Amino acid sequence: MVVGDISTGTELLVIGGGPGGYAAAIRGGQLGLDVTLVEADAYGGTCLNEGCIPSKALIHASDLAHEVDGAEGMGIHARVDVDLRGLVGWKDGIVDRLTDGVETLCTANGVNLVAGRAEFVDDGTARVAHGGEGRGSESIEFEHAVIATGSRPIELPELPFDGERILHSGDVLALDSLPDSMLVVGGGYIGMELSTTFAKLGSDVTVVEALGDILPRYADDITRLVRERAEALGVEFRLGEAATGFEETGSVARVSTETEAGETNGYDAERVLVAVGREPASDTCNVGAAGVEPNDDGAIETDDATRTGVEHVHAVGDVAGEPMLAHAAYREGHVAAEVVAGEPARLDQQAIPAAVFTDPEIGSVGLDADGAAAEGFDPVVGEMPLAASGRALTLGADEGFVRVIADADTEFVLGARIVAPAASELIAEVGLAIEMGARLGDIAATVHTHPTLSEAVAEAAANARGAALHVPNR
Ligand code: FAD
Ligand code: NAD
């Protein structure tokens, strides 16, 4: 049966049900707005379905398998067999639970959920093609809109995704058997998180990175720790080589690379993960019809109220450009809904944290010393190496550090860099300190539970003041 075209109206139309979109929809519902959320594929977007959550599930499982396998030194003897199909099934269960939760939360907050692909017709109307043949379409008139259509993996024309040999991160997170060998193109966030994971699960992993080092956004002493640990796990690095093409040779792909000097190489692998960045998905909903113009990178630029150039049309999350992080998307979605509801909300946070879930993890927030100096501060740096942390030693993790950066005159906390187990959690304390305008003494004088890794944050702050107990002070 063909369902004909129907016409509806809504106060706030949200296009895309990922972290940015569902945050906007739920917050809008909480504030009493009449909200319609349109999702073309699966609620939860990239983050819940093929990004943050699936990758962290696999990372946790690979840590477990690897730790048990290597625990002889602790007197624990075990034989580990990895059944990737079972592991991926467990991960899918977590995803289902969370995506169901998003639907339930939206409904509980009065959000009208529409399944289908939305496209703007003009700056007050969108059409939604309902999923599935013969399902008809719907015209939705809106007062305000939030574009939250996310991003997608960048495809290299020389290595097009085929779902078999040349894979994007979503494909890799759904594999049902462990590849003997995996070539990872790109040593960024995804490349480093997943190369470590698959090395721990037992694949032979090679990372090809075009630049001279992995994780280009991080300082040398941070990337060195992560790279050396990955090397110890068996990951091979080909730095300064860009992937330039591939050919199938029997049951493997041969990926060719080229250095800046023009030297070429070739590497064979059963599977190839291409993780060379993500691009905003600003071309999925005909934004031009609403008067919105993406920039040259495809991102929709916004002001601090998440407004695009069109007053009543907002953009949040990955489609609005860097940082392409789920927690940034949540915050932006939140602000968009509050602005639409007439609240004085703004994107006014002092710092947005970032974490790389490698081994060890990296946590980062605010300024480093160079950044602080560039902003006119006289930076003071305090550090606590993990080798001096009792808790780190009990976790078998003595490589890494907590580094806190502050302004020397005022002692206001400006940032932190942490390389440690659970750095993704530890960094939150410094984020809070920055938002609250805390000083080094506030962190140092706060009693931290013993024995914990969080004590290292307090010691790093104390070290910056020349008052640490467990490390020599500068
Ligand atoms: P998305 O989550 O991409 O959601 C966009 C949604 O819009 C999709 O569901 C899509 O189907 C829908 N859509 C698109 N066009 C239309 C249309 N026309 N009509 C209707 N619906 C439409 N970030 C972190 O902070 N921490 C992490 O640990 C982390 N790990 C990651 C690991 C991987 C492997 C990947 C790929 C990403 C990771 N990210 C992580 C990034 C994070 O997933 C994104 O920043 C986040 O999902 C962005 O949210 P969003 O709402 O902007 O977009
Ligand atoms: P990325 O930008 O982090 O890294 C891409 C890497 O690929 C770079 O180091 C780049 O030099 C390299 N590269 C580009 N072209 C190449 C080529 N031809 N050959 C070899 N190397 C090449 O991108 P990503 O890892 O794909 O991740 C995309 C985004 O997803 C991240 O920027 C981040 O916003 C998000 N993400 C976040 C997390 C997290 O928060 N923990 C985890 C995964 C993804």
Image (tube, grey):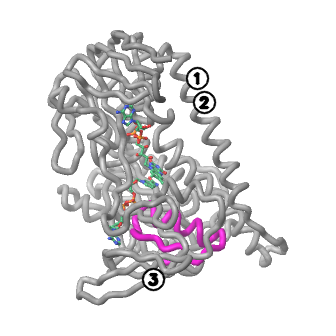
Q: Residue at x 27, y 40 (%)?
A: 282
User: Helix, strand or loop at disc 1?
Assistant: helix
Q: Residue at x 35, y 80 (%)?
A: 257
Marks 3 and 2, how far apart in space? 42 Å
Mark 2–mark 1 CB contact (< 8 Å) = yes
Nearer to the camera, 158 or 150: 158
The answer to whether residue 9 is left or right of residue 200 is: left
Instruction: Work out whether 94 lies above or below 77.
Output: above
User: Helix, strand or loop at disc 3?
Assistant: strand
Residue ranking furthest to the front: 1
Which label is found at residue 100? 2
Which label is found at residue 267? 3
User: Helix, strand or loop at disc 2?
Assistant: helix
- Closer mark to the observer between disc 1 and disc 3: 3
Q: Quadrant of the C terminus?
A: bottom left
Q: Residue at x 70, y 48 (%)?
A: 90
Kind of residue at badge 2: Asp
Where is residue 51 drawn, in percent x and y? 49, 49
| Magenta highlight on residue 191 | yes
- The residue indicated by pointer 1 is 104
Kind of residue at badge 1: Thr
Label 3 or label 2, whichever comes before in sequence order: 2
Residue 348: name its quadrant.
top left
Neighbourhood count class around disc 2 (C-alpha, 10 Å): few under 14, some 14–19, many 20 upward: some
Label 1 or label 3, whichever comes before in sequence order: 1
The magenta segment is 182-206
Neighbourhood count class around disc 1 (C-alpha, 10 Å): few under 14, some 14–19, many 20 upward: few
